[in-house]
Amino acid sequence: SSCAFRAVVLSVTTPSWATSVMSALSKSTTSSESTKTYLFEQRVPIPSYLLALAVGQIESVDISPRCRVWAEPSVVKAAAFEFDGMEAFLSAAEEITQLPYPWKRYDLLCLPPSFPYGGMENPCLTFVTPTLLAGDKSLADVVAHEIAHSWTGNLVTNLTWEHFWLNEGYTMWLQRKIMCAVNNDPLLFDFDAIGGFSSLKESVEMFPDDYTRLIPVLGDADPDDAFSSIPYEKGFHLLYVLERKVGSESFLSFTRAYLQKYKYGSITSEEFQSFFEKYFEGNKEADGVDWERWLHEPGMPIEVLEFDRTLSKASEELAEAWIAYDVSNGVGVAPTTDIAGWSSSQITCVLDTMLDKTNAGEANPLKLSTVKEFGDMYGLKETKNSEILFRYCRLAIHARDEDILPVVVHFITTQGRMKYIRPLYLDLFTCGYGVLAVKTFLSKKDFYHPIAAKMIAVDLKISVERGNHHVQGEQEEENTQKVDQNTKKVFHDISSNKILMAIVIITGFAGIFALRRRK
């Protein structure tokens, strides 16, 4: 399906101190004594939700002739360092898809901390969260994800949000191909997929059946309510099953043909199925796909693949050793594995395995003494890597580690990425720290993006209206006073920080960010 498209031409006038950037090409800039006027043009067809504009006190660093990083002056150098692999990701994607990047420029804007997603793949101007600034480029796979969207999502788009997996599942597949190509290591594909599968299991357990289908039953519900890792990882799993059936080279050829046929248009799951069946007509390896169950059956994938665990083995063994030590009630000896040379992904895998083996830390949480010893041994409370800190905080909350509470409060009130803040607020709420969770949220709710604030309020079973709030249900009073002094200090520290950057986001229709991003 497709629709008529006209070029977008937009003129933006800003104060002279501000810079404007857009999901379009900059054509000209004129200045007066107090203002600047920017002219932008987008001639390549895009879905309406990809129209975006940002205005603020920002600077840029060129990465390549077609790639540039934008950010506030205080972080632009750090962002340029972190994301200097943009051109390599882009070139790898072009090689894999055999289609050139169609929007000419690929710039990236590092947004203020309240941005609720990992990234947003606007053509010419990807938005990313500053939680990716780990200092070692270890979280740059999110940029590879947004770059992959240039083909799977932007070039070929799901027709409606019920078919969101076509955007996100295919982008996970392409992102993992990009990372393998750039690092020259095919084993990274399954290694990354293992972490994704853990995330999928947790989402399936949390969400109602209608939202765990590849084609969810949304009805009149707000799509925010269904947002999870399911379209990403269950969609990826279907594609990987298809790839395993027909072979990697054949599936790559199919993907190239798919992108070529449907470029600059939108597609449904049924159209994808029809194209796959037609492309592989007569190929017995492609037979036997139960499309009805794959697309409409709730829960985990109907066929679960065995992943290559070469890269995850050491991480999983270390996690199991700590769990065994925990079960021994301290009789045994704590693992002493040196992980100083491990990648952040390997450490994340340790934490994922520990969370998975203890049912996300809820049903069989690790003992407080074990979690403290584990965290102290590897300095996890001090890490600058958001993925590692997020997982360790979850383990510690479920172990009822009150020393972690100031760390958690600082983490969830200095950035607004929903991937982190929603689970952590919910963990506090369900583990005896409900008053702290509600108090923290109400104190900082205006810091969060409206979508994030809305979803957290739902999670905490409260309603917030025009600055007033009504707390529904019983809240735990225990443990609150013990952390009050620490949280007061945290709140004071946070309020002393100012965000200088003003951001305006324009989208093709209201509420589109309710439907978007990762990460």
Image (cartoon, helix red, strand yellow):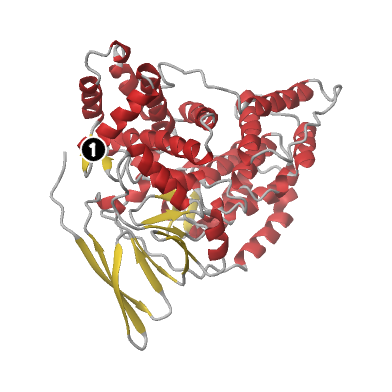
Is residue 513 visible from the viewing direction of this image?
yes
Q: 451 or 56, which is in the foreground?
A: 56
Q: Which amino acid type corresponds to the residue marked 1 in the rendered image?
A: Gln
Q: Residue 65's image quarter? A: bottom left
Residue 495 location in percent, x, y? Answer: 60, 66
Residue 483 coordinates in the image, percent (x, y):
72, 50
* Circle 1 SS class: helix
* Closer to us: 102 or 392: 102
Tag count: 1
Q: Quadrant of residue 392?
A: top right
485 and 476: which is toward the camera: 485
Say above or below: 394 vs 464. Answer: above
Instruction: Look at 20% across and 21% down and name the residue there.
Output: 278
Looking at this rendering, what residue extends furthest in the bottom direction? 33
Q: Residues within 10 Å of mark 1 (few under 14, many from 20)?
A: some
The answer, for residue 213, to whether it is visible in the render is no
Quadrant holding the N terminus: top left
Which residue position holds label 1? 260
- Going 42% across and 55% down the picture, which residue do you hit? 127
Q: Is residue 514 left or right of residue 273?
A: right
Q: Position of residue 338 (x, y in %)?
A: 77, 35
**456 above or below 331?**
below
Whole-percent x, y for residue 449 in the image: 45, 55
Q: Judge left or right: residue 147 versus residue 25.
A: right
Identity of the residue furthest to the left in this view = 4
In the figure, residue 492 lies in which quadrant?
bottom right
